[in-house]
Amino acid sequence: MKDITIKITDREGVLHKIEAPTDMAMNLMEVIRSYELAPEGTIGVCGGMAMCASCQCYVKSDHELPEMGIDEDMMLAEAFHVKDNSRLGCQIPITQDLNGLEVELAPES
Amino acid sequence: MITTDILIIGAGPTGLFTVFEAGLLKLRCHLIDALPQAGGQCSEIYPKKPIYDIPGFPEILAGDLTTNLLEQCKQFEPGFTLGERAETIEKQEDGSFIVTTNKGTKHKAPIVAIAGGLGSFEPRKPPIPNIANFEDKGVEYMIREPELYRDKNVVIAGGGDSALDWSIFLTAIAKSVTLVHRRNEFRGALDSVEKVQELKDAGKINLITPAEITGVVGDNHITGVVISKNNEDEYILETDHFIPLFGLAPKLGPIANWGLEIEKNAIKVNNALDYQTNIPGIYAIGDVNTYPGKLKLILCGFHEATLMCQSAFQRIFPDKKYVMKYTTVGGVDGFDGTRKEAPKAVVKKIN
């Protein structure tokens, strides 16, 4: 198991190139939290149940992501600042295939 | 003025368990919560989700955990100020504190325990540029007084339970009810969705989907909303009220200005001793606090609440000798006169 590289643009517009482990059952929201790229309490509020949209991000690279589940889809239907490339970070497990992924955090709401 | 021994801010699992632990020490508690019901996140965000790491419960729904905690502490007769947010705190000359809510309710106690989780739940406001100008002038983020809508035209936006339930409810009061949602599908409970369908078919709810409200129009009071269908077709729908119901999000809020040491949106406490903050007499327990190695788990909140109550007892009664008693040995004496105790052993002689 190897770490993968992810490029994350935070809410201030700063680009971070970080290493994420693929063998820790982490999702993208948890990786962002572990690097403290968004203030505590403003991301992952529901803990990762696709019930708050505080981990919404825009996917900027063309990686193939896991298909959106109904919970995520319905939550995004009520989130703000939603774009076509919006996803909830908590619903994206970190896998080898995501090496080089580029995402941008959506504004806090 | 409400007076108590321990004033708990936040009626989530940690706050509720504090009532039990304080009760064992004969200390009375009163809880303040911004939500209209107890349970915190467990009842507001995920009541139907299972939790697997509550010791002794292989699996329990968050809503059931709340019910159990209320049952466990009920003989200690906690007081509740619900639907109000703790706003200010003033230290008195005698060392006690007065906490006032946003509705002006005053509470006095020698000990304040902040069990506020991620903060008080506030309505999520849609990013419509001029919406702030119309707040309480036809735009309301929660329904406090349904009578306000009698014989009025009302537009509700959202796709969850509150949007559905209020749309249903207001059909009996309002002149017209329009429900706007970005999708044709709704996230709410199935029977609510079916009821809305019924009311739509009966012409009592005007359903506009998939669509979004992108603007608010009016002078002193709202007169209409801009509805956008598929980002193309924009038109103004006349209305007297616009109620965006997009759920609630927690904000640390006024507590952040109480002079407490804050780090990463949480309150720093002394975890080596008693979870007291930098202000003696004010404690912070559960998800709202931080210390080296902190884990935001309900079970950690229970532990913190227990130790905090012991420290609170010593602050209130500095000269009293005290020993911790096991409930199995000492039983539980409620303030309501009830007593729980282990059954006495039956001795029978063998001849």
Image (cartoon, coloured by chain):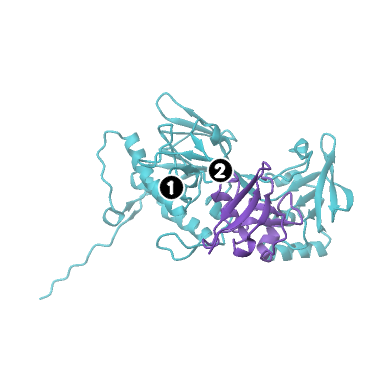
Q: Which of the two discs, 1 and 2, labels the residue nearer the N terminus?
A: 2
Q: Tag 1: Cα neighbours inside 10 Å, few (<14), some, or many (≥20)?
A: few
Whether residue B153 appears in this view of the structure is no
In x, y percent, where is residue B38? 53, 50
Above or below: residue B188 compared with residue B306: below
Answer left or right for B299 relative to A103.
Answer: left
For disc 1, the marked residue is B293
Q: Which mark is residue B119?
A: 2
Q: Quadrant of residue B320?
A: top left
Q: How many marks?
A: 2
What hue represents chain A?
Answer: purple
Q: Residue A14's spot in the image, x, y percent?
A: 66, 43
Judging from the image, mark 1 belongs to the subunit labelled B
- Horizontal side, residue B42 vs residue B73: left or right: right
Give me the C-alpha separation between circle 1 and circle 2.
Answer: 21 Å
Taking the image as shown, residue B73 lies to the left or right of residue A81, namely left
Q: Amino acid at mark 2?
A: Gly
Looking at the rendering, which quadrant does residue B310 occupy?
Answer: top left
Query: Which chain has been coloured cyan in this picture?
Result: B
